[in-house]
Amino acid sequence: MNDYKPWLQANDQYLTAALADLRTRLQRAAQLHDAPATPPAPAAAATALMESAPAVNAPGGQKHSWFARMFSSQPARTPLSNAQMKVIDTPPAAQPLVVDVPDAGATATDAAASPASSVTDDSQHTPALSVLANRLGLSAFERDLLLLCIGMELDTRFPALCAQAQHDAAKPYPTFALAFAVLDDPSWDALSPERPLRYWRLLDIHQPGAQPLIGAALSADERVVNFVKGMNYLDDRLTPLLTALPPATLPPSQRAIADQLLDGLHQVPVGDTLPVVQLLGSDSTSKQAIAQTIAAAFGAQAYRLSAELLPSATAEQETLLRLWQRESQLLPLALYLDAAEVEHGAAAAILVKRFLARAGGLSFVDAREPWASATTRALSVDVAKPTAVEQRTLWQRLLGDVAGAQPQQLAGHFDFNLGRIEQIAHAALAAVEQKPEALAQTLWQGALAQTRPALDQLAQRIEPKAGWDDLKLPDSEKTLLRQIADQVGQRSTVYDDWGFRQRMNRGLSISALFTGESGTGKTMAAEVLAKELSLSLYRIDLSAVVSKYIGETEKNLRKLFDAAEDGGAILFFDEADALFGKRSEVKDSHDRYANIEVNYLLQRLESFRGLAILATNMKGALDTAFLRRLRFVINFPFPGVAERKAIWASVFPAQAAVTALDVDRLARLALTGGSIQGIALNAAFMAAKAGVSVGMPLLLDAARSEYRKLDKPVNEADFRWLESAGGKP
């Protein structure tokens, strides 16, 4: 900044004069010790302190008033002006840690007459040490003691002077005893852990063994030394744990939430502790944007701290807490504690509550549900992603004139926050700079790619290959499937343009039940829908979801639905009766928790934004409450002769070596499409092994095996008329 350089010069001048004064005091203490003893002997330092009398007075009985004059106009904890804050809070990245010091023979009078004395009269050039003392509540003695320790880092003459003043060559360092001897208005309570020097960890006390505290070596904390020298930066012990939240632009719906929170925070009386802001929901990116916007309104920068990084040891957490509290006094900071993955009742939850209760300042917590705590006041709000209309508007603005119908389609199928939309749009535009006609496909593939990583860990992705022509169903069932595809494609028009979203709090999900015997085409129908809509199809792996441990199943389901909320995916619950079974009468704790799982599924299925398909061959086993919440129920009947004929006619790929088949006669075998597919595949392997083409005899052998697998009786009489069509191999 333009005004940083003159401030730094004035700050260096102040330190030069202040350190010269300290050197003079140390020299005087050494000289007084070397002078002949004069009765009566002065009281010991500790005794004098106990009697509230200073151990050493300035010559002539007058206490040296340099520090008193320097800070007499600065009351404790007085906030600085905005201009002063900017000067001290935003220096360049690095400044030299050297101070121009006068000659060793400089006197107290010389120090008082130095240019540093003019700094106290310039409110724009408040010394950094004065800023530190005001913000942390240091007394004049504590401030001077801290400067004595800082002098060890800035002036190479201090170690020798400290040793001489203490008359012990083995003590070339400051101690509390030395400070009591050479500084004005000494106070015993400066040693207390509750006083600023030790509470804020401004000093490091090196106290080996049983050495008395008053004689222990003292050193100034490196962060404090650099602050006093004019460099203000985040403590490097916190840097690995914290991540600065980027600036954010909020859509109107989230801007309203930020304004609501700002109103609540501004109503807190001056001097009272600010309540913790609890940001609830699953979209951490939107919550971070709101937190940074609020922090910026307070002139602060929000930093994210993951709850996983909170130390479990009490001493380590106390150190982290003190460092954060100190940084909050030295820098305009706000805390964003990310506890989204912390479960209530877990050990980590206790750490989070303890940390929040004492962090102070402007604090945010990212959680899915409110954190109840008797010791912490809180403002809680639910944070959702931008509305579909806001997402569409942003897509339109980013894509410009080449957008076409893409904004409506993307906003209808996907539920992204603003940062994700900007990322996808910029990447797509850069990729098709030379081929604008490929924009639609590139955008769609980019959006699908964003939804894959989270779901790939929780479900099995199925590559859809079947089309409408591969699906052999009666016309009525095909019509219902096309209605599902149409509703998914027109969600944006009906929900947003026609206003249904504003009138409906729930029930916006599109869910369907596919019921019928195994092999009747339920999975293939899900593939057809995924291919028609260009969406990813994920089959839920029950082994990865269902857990014997209480509460784990709901946790896994929550992760699954949260990952799918971004859209672009169809959730396919095969064998759905395992999850969506009927609730039973509660006879023990197992029944109660099993019912809780079903209740949770009922709620999430209804609020789920995307397309969910349940498939089962035991419709009667499903809880009736699910049937009310399902928009479509499609029965997949056992295929009739016409459907079986169509399946046999298309079961072999064009490249397969197949002789003429009598599909009319094959269709008389009472088999489902899945069984027919299995027979064709087994016959193909037998033909490949024998080096012949697939013919009727091989198909009949494979059919006999399929019958036995299904525990169906094999009536050879039923196969004789089929064998006459092809003979023996």
Image (spheres, grey):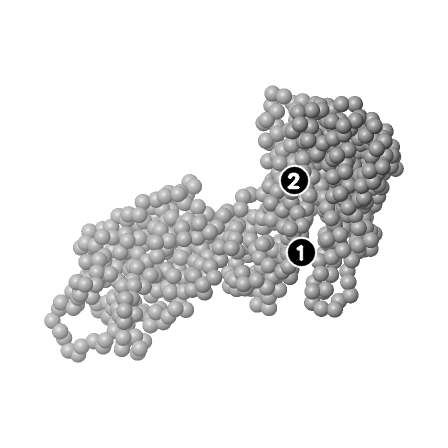
Task: Residue 76: name its quadrant.
Answer: bottom left
Density class for disc 1 (Cα within 10 Å; few <14, some 14-19, many ≥20) is: some
**Whole-percent x, y for residue 295 in the image:** 55, 50
Residue 461 — which label? 2
Mark earlier in primary sequence (2, 1): 2
SS assignment at label 1: helix
Q: Is residue 469 above or below residue 334?
A: above
SS assignment at label 2: strand
Task: Residue 477: name its quadrant.
Answer: top right
Q: Amino acid at mark 2?
A: Arg
Q: Amino acid at mark 1?
A: Glu
Q: What's the residue at 51%, 50% (across, down)?
A: 303
User: Which residue is at the front of the view, 307 or 230?
Assistant: 307
Residue 538 — which label? none
Residue that numbered label 1 is attached to = 554
Residue 488 in the figure: left or right of residue 324? right
User: Which residue is at the front of the view, 197 or 91?
Assistant: 197
Q: Is residue 521 above or below residue 588?
A: above
Answer yes or no: do the residues labelled 2 and 1 have beta carbons within 8 Å? no
* Distance Cα–Cα, label 2 vs label 1: 21 Å
The quarter of the image holding the C terminus is top right
